[in-house]
Image (cartoon, helix red, strand yellow):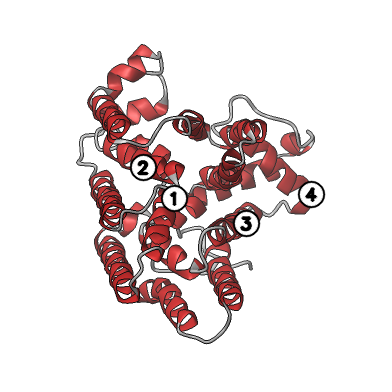
Amino acid sequence: MWSVVFYVISFWWVHVCVRNSNFSPRVKMGFEAIYCFFALFIFFCFRDITILNDTHAYFEWFDDLSHSAEHMSHGIWHVNALDRFEPGFQIYANMIMHFITRNAYGIIFISGLIVTIANILFIRKFTNGICLVVFLMLCAGVLESEYSGMRQGIAICVLYYAYFQLLKHRLFIFILCGIIATTLHSSAIVFFLLLILQKVELNRKFISITFIGGIIIAFFIDKVFEMLGLTDLVYYEQGMTRDSVAWAAIINTVISAIVLWFCYYIQRKYSFKVKEPLLWWMTILNVIFNMTSITFPIMTRFSLYFYPFIFILCILLINRVPSGKTRLKYINLIIIGFLLRFIVILEYKNDWNVMYPYLFYNFN
């Protein structure tokens, strides 16, 4: 277990060492980006199929298709309407098995490579401290979920690009990216909420309305599914038959709510002008979907789309704090909090997203 903990901590150590060096900001960012790439690439792209909960499921699915003569006789655009995975992901898998490799590990390797590169490029758009943000995302289980749930992980990567297109008011490209992401994982449709929220003023009135709406949905989510005629979905059945306490959802709700409060505290304390309203809205949506997942656990899939943005907002606000000592205090507070969360869950709930005992895949 501790080898995994030290691996995650290494991102923090590298960030501290680079930050205290005398190199130019551009060189520092480049070094952190290179370290993150190789550290994430080696750990996640060469992992055994027992590491992360969904890895083996994608491996077996791809293996069955790539060794099916009937399936391989079709072209890359062939989609099986009865398959459990969305059509876009089926086409993506077809491209891998037709043009790159029929080895089932190919989908793990290539998906991991895409997630690694996309996250690094996304983070560097906001901050030079790439290692710090990656550290926080690992401690929160966000990156692990992206690597594990390959469909959603790649959909999130598409939506990273879509977010910047929305900021530039390129609505056609944003909508196109949203459609593509939805064909990879149907839950990506939630990102279209940003089309509405970008028009909504960020004030107490609308924030209160949003939270009240979220609370109502949390208590009556089953009625919402019944009203929409979606009671035959497997997600609905899983949510309604669950009789255990959704501790993961409770923990995520508490943590995301604390981060939101922390961001609000800094914003108010230093009277910062709101420069990133969409980042605030996504942080709020993350809290709401986490809260809803307490009664309906599958809603965590929706919250995952907005989770990376809460770290971006938090770091951006901390970096605007004028006092260097105060900035360091805030960052250390966040680091310690998320590191404790990571260690406790790794020790007592490793089955939530299996990380140890870590093994590399045996290609022999």
Q: Position of residue 177 (x, y in %)?
A: 63, 36
Front label number (3 vs 2): 2
Quadrant in which residue 8 is drawn:
bottom left
Front label number (4 vs 3): 4
Q: Position of residue 159 (x, y in %)?
A: 56, 42
The amino acid at mark 4 is Phe
Q: CA distance from mark 4 to mark 3?
A: 14 Å
The amino acid at mark 1 is Phe
Which of 97/164 is in front? 164
Q: CA distance from mark 3 to mark 2?
A: 32 Å
Badge number at residue 99: 4
| Pointers 1 and 3 in contact (C-beta within 8 Å) | no
The amino acid at mark 3 is Tyr
Q: Earlier in the sequence, mark 2 or mark 1?
A: 2
For disc 2, the marked residue is: 286
| Left or right of 11 in this view: 68 | right
Q: CA distance from mark 4 to mark 2?
A: 38 Å
Please say whether residue 21 is visible from this viewpoint.
Answer: yes
For disc 1, the marked residue is: 309
* Residue occupying image coordinates x 65% and y 32%: 176
Q: Earlier in the sequence, mark 4 or mark 1?
A: 4
Q: Residues within 10 Å of mark 2 (few under 14, many from 20)?
A: many
For disc 3, the marked residue is: 105
Q: Residues within 10 Å of mark 1 (few under 14, many from 20)?
A: many
| Pointers 2 and 1 in contact (C-beta within 8 Å) | yes
Which of 319/344 is in front? 319
Front label number (1 vs 3): 1
